[in-house]
Amino acid sequence: MGSVVTFNVTEILEIPIGVGEITAWNLLYFVIILIVGVAVAKAVSVNVRRALSERLPKNERELLTKLIYYIIVLWAIVIALPQLKFDLSGLLVAGGIAGLVIGFASQSVVANLVSGLFLMFEHPIKIGDNINVADVSGSVEDIRILSTVVKTYDGIYVRIPNEQVFTSNITNYVHNAARRFEYNIGIRYQDDANEAIRIASEVISTHPFALKSPAPSVFVDNLGDNSVNLTVYIWAPARNWWDVRTDLLWKIKQELEENGIEIPFPQRTVWFADGLEVKNRTAGKKETEE
């Protein structure tokens, strides 16, 4: 009878393959770790690309996803290298020193990058929003990885580092669908305040962009030196509030004047003391006799 040859797979995989003490097991683990790392990198980059599809321009979105992909792959390689009996101690020391140098040299860049990522996920602003941030007011033109570009109402483009945007108070004028504005209107004391309130309310109710809910409000706020002062609160769509504000103010003024209600000029009442009045009269008589 012939002899039976048996193979022990474990023993075979533990045999050195001729490169130092590296065995087939080590090589297999190295390959498996790399395959898993690449698969994870692809999955993460696809999800990041999908999550940022509406938040970043295509070029910057692709750059960010590639950066994440290669970071994960590099991390997998570092984990897999010990399987090839590669001593990482010297590499880690050199990498640590290089990292410190690069970190100090590019700390502002890293801060802007991290702040940009937080802005993308927190999403406090988006392109087209009217905002005030870092003492700059205008419309958001672009949100980049390192900076945000704002076009001021004067047509000037301002680049603001993302770190400054993220750490500053952000006022977003259009985040809410509706925005309120107000007028302070003075009328003469002899005019009918109730009639003025009625006229202003009717003008507001006929405007197509003056919201019914929240409802507008017109009331006597205070009694001034020269006028009875009305306060008007009006809500309008946030995207149209400026046009509504300028349009309604002029229409309310015209309608009040057409109904005989006027905005008064500043007035002063001057009182003379009795002695001064007599003295002035006496002086006037002497001048007449001469």
Image: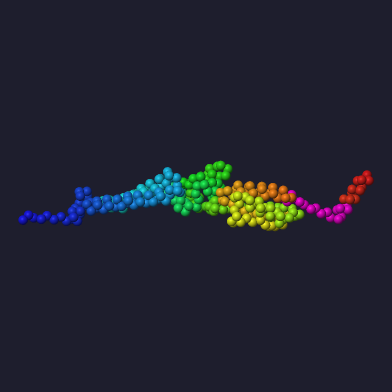
Q: Residue at x 66, y 47 (%)?
A: 250
User: Which one is nearer the viewer's eye here, 181 or 33?
Assistant: 181
Tell me, yes or no, if residue 70 can be seen here. yes
Q: Quadrant of the C terminus?
A: top right
Q: Which residue is drawn at 43% across and 49% down?
A: 52
State the image coordinates of residue 282 (x, y, percent, origin top left). 90, 50
State the image coordinates of residue 191 (x, y, percent, origin top left). 74, 54
Which residue is farthest front? 206
Would residue 25 be found to the left or right of residue 236 on screen?
left
Q: What stretch is highlighted in magenta?
A: 261-279
User: Which one is nearer the viewer's eye here, 228 or 164?
Assistant: 228
- Colour mapping: rainbow
Would residue 170 be found to the left or right of residue 192 on screen?
left
Which residue is farthest right? 289
Q: Which residue is drawn at 53% across and 52% down?
A: 175
Question: Would you identify the image quadrant in which residue 288 lies?
Answer: top right
Question: Would you identify the image quadrant in which residue 220 lies?
Answer: bottom right
State the image coordinates of residue 163 (x, y, percent, origin top left). 48, 50
State the image coordinates of residue 102 (x, y, percent, origin top left). 40, 47
Would residue 227 be found to the left or right of residue 244 on screen?
right
User: Which one is nearer the viewer's eye here, 142 or 220?
Assistant: 220
User: Which one is nearer the viewer's eye here, 164 or 68?
Assistant: 68
Number of marks in the rendered image: 0
Q: Which residue is drawn at 43% across and 48% down?
A: 53
Residue 265 magenta-drawn? Answer: yes
Q: Quadrant of the N terminus?
A: bottom left
Tell me, yes or no, if residue 110 can be seen here. no
Residue 78 magenta-drawn? Answer: no
Would residue 16 be found to the left or right of residue 212 on screen?
left
The overriding secondary structure of the stretch rendered in magenta is loop
